[in-house]
Image: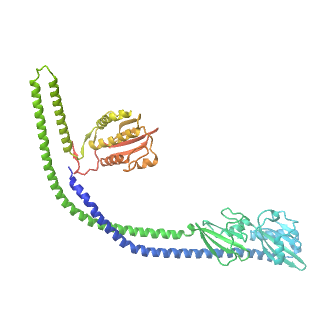
């Protein structure tokens, strides 16, 4: 029998030493982590701010460069048109085939030009080449015509005009003596969109242009079409770049120099600060690794010291435990003598009673014989109860490993539960496999496991329910299936049914389940649960044929 007194005493000592151990560990960890957190946290914050500052500076420089590129494009296209108008007079430009030749020459070098047109000083379309039917149109009343005549050069906002499609133009005026004429070109929106969106590249973001009214002058990646109203409200004219951080994006805005258009570049923070996040992740891993090594060293060192203290304490408890056990055995012997003394008295009474019955055998009145018989029965019951109580008290509590007949255990439990099942009108069906081999295990723990599951099944099956118990053999295990007719288990109950304090919706109490699973794990078995095909729950208990439990040698009593 294991030394239970020592086990209890050692258990009581454990919290005391572990409390001291916890205090020491907490103090050492705090002393080690405090400088790590202060120094590492300060360096981390400084590096994070520096990287963010440098990243934003780079983005602003990129936005300025992008704005300058758009300005340069518009200026260069304007200069191209000025060069053509300066090198050609009106009569030559309106001569048959000339304007087509000029556009073809431009498109071979600069595919951004979509069409060309010559407009006279009265607004008449003198010559046109391009995909639209604009010949003969008069532009005298249009805003762009009036602006070009007044200023000499004009880059328009996106408008629809006579072609009823969004576009923008570049127009230059040529004074040729008494003749004044305008060379006008339309820029291809698709190619211009590509130039504007280059700054976004492969990043998660967007780049577009809006006019002073907030209308899109280029298409947006996120669905903004030409001339639609943008969600960005143009601020007043300013120099440089404005940075706005909202939500998960960073928006940079800057005004163009050549035309009152606002360049808007929006980039995803996660994409921009990816390098920063990698640095943060690496720093965190380094800190965690260093912390883990420090904690491991502290735990190993302090645990070794505490273990030495516990071992010395255990030695003292072993001596105390032996003395207590000796006193217990002495008390038990006195108790045993008293029990056997009672047994002697009982047998004496039986003997005397039997003698009296024999002497009065010839009496006519049999009433006294009946009384004596009842006295014999009463004394016999008293003796049996005393003997049984003593046997239960003195019975060994150690696990006993022996050959166990699973069917015998189940049948005994079923007989024990028969009255309770009849009261609830529960139908218990058995399907035992013939020739099932005995298993090498502890009969007491198996009895407890089966009793737990059968009691649970009778509780959840309810009145007029049913329980089914079946056995089979699979490889080196004996399988016991216990199913009930109650409701099935939900996903949450299925995951927590073996928790000590969990009570399922249908009434399974996790305390008995947890004890049963713990017992089965100690003897090398397994327990699993699943829902039945139609209703109810099936508990599957796997008992190994050969004992493969985790009891220590001092706990086991093995019977061959």
| Image-quadrant location for residue 132 | bottom right
Q: Nearer the viewer, residue 525 or 397?
A: 397
Q: Can residue 402 be seen here? A: yes
Quadrant in which residue 440 is drawn: top left
Q: Is residue 271 left or right of residue 555?
A: right
Q: Residue visible at 38% across and 34% down?
A: 424
Q: Look at the image and tell me whether residue 474 can be seen.
A: no
Q: Position of residue 172 (x, y in %)?
A: 81, 75
Is 95 above or below relative to 13? Answer: below
Measuring 82% from the left and 77% from the top, which residue is drawn there? 152
Position of 239 relative to 302 (above/below): below
Q: Nearer the viewer, residue 419 or 129?
A: 419
The image's colouring method is: rainbow
For image coordinates 44% across by 74% down, the residue present is 40
In the depicted view, which residue is nearer to us: 384 or 436? Answer: 384
Vertical position of residue 552 compared to residue 75: above or below: above
Image position, residue 5 (x, y; %): 21, 54
Kindly identify the residue that appears in the image at 36 percent across and 73 percent down. Answer: 31
Horizontal side of residue 213 vs 12, given as left or right: right
Q: Quadrant of the C terminus?
A: top left
Q: Residue furthest top?
A: 364
Place of residue 434 in the rendered image (x, y in percent of width and height, measured from the top left):
33, 33
Image-based side of 247 in relation to 229, left or right: left
Count of numbered tags? 0
In the rendering, at what x and y percent does residue 549 appear?
29, 48
Q: Is residue 236 left or right of residue 313?
A: right
Q: Residue furthest right?
A: 178
């Amino acid at each position: 029998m294991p030394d239970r007194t020592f086990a209890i005493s050692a258990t009581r000592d454990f919290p005391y030493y572990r409390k001291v151990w916890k205090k020491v560990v907490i103090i050492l960890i705090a002393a080690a982590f405090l400088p790590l957190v202060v120094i590492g946290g300060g360096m981390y914050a400084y590096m994070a701010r520096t990287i963010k500052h440098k990243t934003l500076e780079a983005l602003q420089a990129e936005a300025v460069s992008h704005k300058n590129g758009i300005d340069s494009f518009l200026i260069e296209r304007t200069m191209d048109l000025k060069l053509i108008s300066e090198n050609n007079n009106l009569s030559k430009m309106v001569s048959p085939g000339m304007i087509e030749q000029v556009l073809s020459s431009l498109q071979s070098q600069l595919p951004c030009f979509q069409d060309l047109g010559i407009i006279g000083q009265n607004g008449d379309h003198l010559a046109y080449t391009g995909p639209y039917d604009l010949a003969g149109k008069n532009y005298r009343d249009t805003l762009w015509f009036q602006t070009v005549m007044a200023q000499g050069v004009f880059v328009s906002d996106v408008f629809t005009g006579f072609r009823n499609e969004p576009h923008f133009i570049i127009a230059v005026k040529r004074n040729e003596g008494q003749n004044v004429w305008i060379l006008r070109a339309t820029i291809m929106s698709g190619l211009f969109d590509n130039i504007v969106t280059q700054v976004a590249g492969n990043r998660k973001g967007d780049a577009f242009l809006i006019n002073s009214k907030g209308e899109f002058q280029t298409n947006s990646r996120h669905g903004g079409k030409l001339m639609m109203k943008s969600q960005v409200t143009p601020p007043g004219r300013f120099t440089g770049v404005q940075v706005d951080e909202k939500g998960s994006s960073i928006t940079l805005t800057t005004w163009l120099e050549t035309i009152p258009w606002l360049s808007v570049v929006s980039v995803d923070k996660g994409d921009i600060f990816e390098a920063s996040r990698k640095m943060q992740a690496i720093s965190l891993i380094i800190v965690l690794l260093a912390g883990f090594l420090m904690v491991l060293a502290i735990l190993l060192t302090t645990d070794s010291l505490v273990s030495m203290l516990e071992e010395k304490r255990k030695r003292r408890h072993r001596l105390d435990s032996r003395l207590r056990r000796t006193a217990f055995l002495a008390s038990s012997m006195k108790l045993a003598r008293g029990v056997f003394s009672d047994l002697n008295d009982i047998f004496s009474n039986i003997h005397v009673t039997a003698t009296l019955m024999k002497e009065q055998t010839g009496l006519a009145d049999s009433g006294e014989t009946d009384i004596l018989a009842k006295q014999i029965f009463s004394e016999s019951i008293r003796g049996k109860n005393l003997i049984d109580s003593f046997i239960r008290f003195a019975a060994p509590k150690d696990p006993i490993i022996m050959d166990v007949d699973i069917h015998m255990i189940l049948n005994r439990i079923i007989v024990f539960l028969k009255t309770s099942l009849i009261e609830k009108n529960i139908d218990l069906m058995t399907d035992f496999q013939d020739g099932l081999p005995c298993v090498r295990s502890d009969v007491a723990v198996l009895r407890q496991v089966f009793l737990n599951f059968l009691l649970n099944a009778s509780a959840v099956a309810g009145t007029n329910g049913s329980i089914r118990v079946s056995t089979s053999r699979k490889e080196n295990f004996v399988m016991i299936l216990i199913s009930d007719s109650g409701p099935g288990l939900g996903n949450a109950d299925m995951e927590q049914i073996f928790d000590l304090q969990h009570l399922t919706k249908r009434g399974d109490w996790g305390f008995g389940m947890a004890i049963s699973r713990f017992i089965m794990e100690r003897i090398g078995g397994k327990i699993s649960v699943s829902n039945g095909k139609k209703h109810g729950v099936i508990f599957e208990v796997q008992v190994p044929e050969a004992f493969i439990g985790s009891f220590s040698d001092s706990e086991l009593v093995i019977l061959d």
